Image: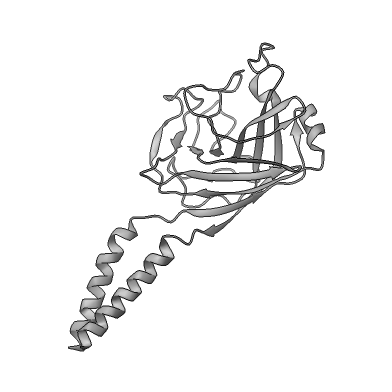
Amino acid sequence: MKNKSLVRASVLATLVAAPLAALASPVNYTFSTNASPHGNADVVALLGGGSQVSGQFTYDAAAPYFGNSGALGFEGDASIYVGNALTPRALSPISGSVAGHAFSDVIGAVSVSNDLPAPSPFRDALMLAADPTPKAGSNTLPTDYPRQLAGFDIGDYRLVNVRLFWVSGLGGATDFLASTDLPAALPTLTGRLALDFVRISDPLNTANTPFYNNSVFFEGLTVQASPVPEPGIFAMALIGLLAIGATRAGRR
């Protein structure tokens, strides 16, 4: 009887765990940068030369493939991952602050480039972006995709995007990606963070200034992970309770 109850408990636990095994746990990350802003001199002066960025976000490597960056009208040959209400989100709530100013976005995207051919200066590139990014050299934001960043105004500048990225040749990274799949965990390498701004006084950019001329970059980006407790912990607790219940029922 004892052996039968143990077998029953084991089978029950397996049946409950099987569908849960397919669910990858999202991971909460905190991030921070060095106090080393550079880029648009006006914005650097407004933020302060000793300012740094810190915040948090959730990353899920189980998010589905969305499309190729070039085919979607963006730059390069990267795999884009987003997710929706029915699937895991690659990048979801991201928030942070810099020099006393806060920003947040409910949904972002992750792009993965592996073994890029010449003339690209990078071999591998991984980027987390709050909102869609324009091509290098463009002077306007993409309009085909929703923009949800809640940014801030500083002087004559408005924050419109936040990007965290790692590229080969930066922070000691040479070839840190094995494919264009979402990595199971984000790099422990040092990365870079960019804050992209537009001019409030010239929202249509009649001056035809390249978009990234208004960006500010922060070096020394590091991220630290802590697993999201749900649903994994509660699911395992449920499995344990069901197994115990089955064992007791078998004894009776």
Q: Is residue 99 left or right of residue 143?
A: right
Quadrant in which residue 206 is drawn? top right
Q: Position of residue 133 (x, y in %)?
A: 55, 28
Res. 166 in view: no
Q: Position of residue 97 (x, y in %)?
A: 69, 44
Give the colour scheme of this rendering.
one colour
Q: Position of residue 182 (x, y in %)?
A: 45, 45
* Residue at 26% in and 84% down: 248
Q: Quadrant of the N terminus?
A: bottom left
Seen as rendered, the residue at the extreme top is 206
* Residue at 58% in and 43% down: 174
In the rendered view, tell whether residue 149 sits above or below residue 204. Answer: below
Q: Is residue 73 left or right of residue 211?
A: left
In the rendered view, tell whether residue 172 sits above or below residue 215. Answer: below
Q: Quadrant of the C terminus?
A: bottom left
Depth check, front residue: 92 or 167: 92
Q: Is residue 181 left or right of residue 42?
A: left
* Residue at 50% in and 49% down: 59
Q: Position of residue 213 (x, y in %)?
A: 70, 23
